[in-house]
Amino acid sequence: MPRDPREIQLEIDAARESLAATLDQLAFRGSPTRLKAQGQAAVVRFLQSPAGKAAMGGLGLLATLTVVQKVRRRRNTGRRVQRRKR
C-alpha cells in the first residue's frame, strides 16, 4: 500500500525539526564561551573551598621556600668567588 505524500512530507518536516533542535543543543553544549565560564566557576568554587585554600597555601609556601633557597645559593656562590680571589 503506497504512502500518502503528505504523510511523508510531515515525517520529513518532523525529522528536520528534531535534527535542528539537536544541533542547537550541541551548539549550546559545545559553546567555547559557555565552557570557559563553567571552567572558571569550577576553579573559583575549588579555590574558595577549604581544600583549595590549603592547596594555595601550600603552593605559596613552596614558592617562598624556593625563592629563599635560590637567594641563599646566590649569596653563597658570591662568597666563594670572593674567598678565592684573596
Image (cartoon, helix red, strand yellow):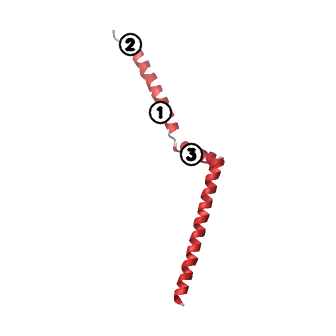
Local SS, label 1: helix
Q: Amino acid at mark 3?
A: Gly
Q: Residues within 10 Å of mark 1 (few under 14, many from 20)?
A: few
- Quadrant of the snapshot with the C terminus: bottom right
Residue at the image position 54 percent from the left and 82 percent from the top: 80
Q: Which label lies toward us, 1 or 2?
A: 1
In percent of width and height, residue 74 lies at 56, 76
Local SS, label 2: loop
Residue beneath label 3, please? 39
Residue at the image position 65 percent from the left and 51 percent from the top: 53
Q: Amino acid at mark 1?
A: Leu
Quarter of the figure with residue 38: top right
- Quadrant of the snapshot with the N terminus: top left
Q: Residues within 10 Å of mark 3 (few under 14, many from 20)?
A: few
Q: Residues within 10 Å of mark 2 (few under 14, many from 20)?
A: few
Q: CA distance from mark 1 to mark 3?
A: 23 Å
Residue beneath label 2, please? 4
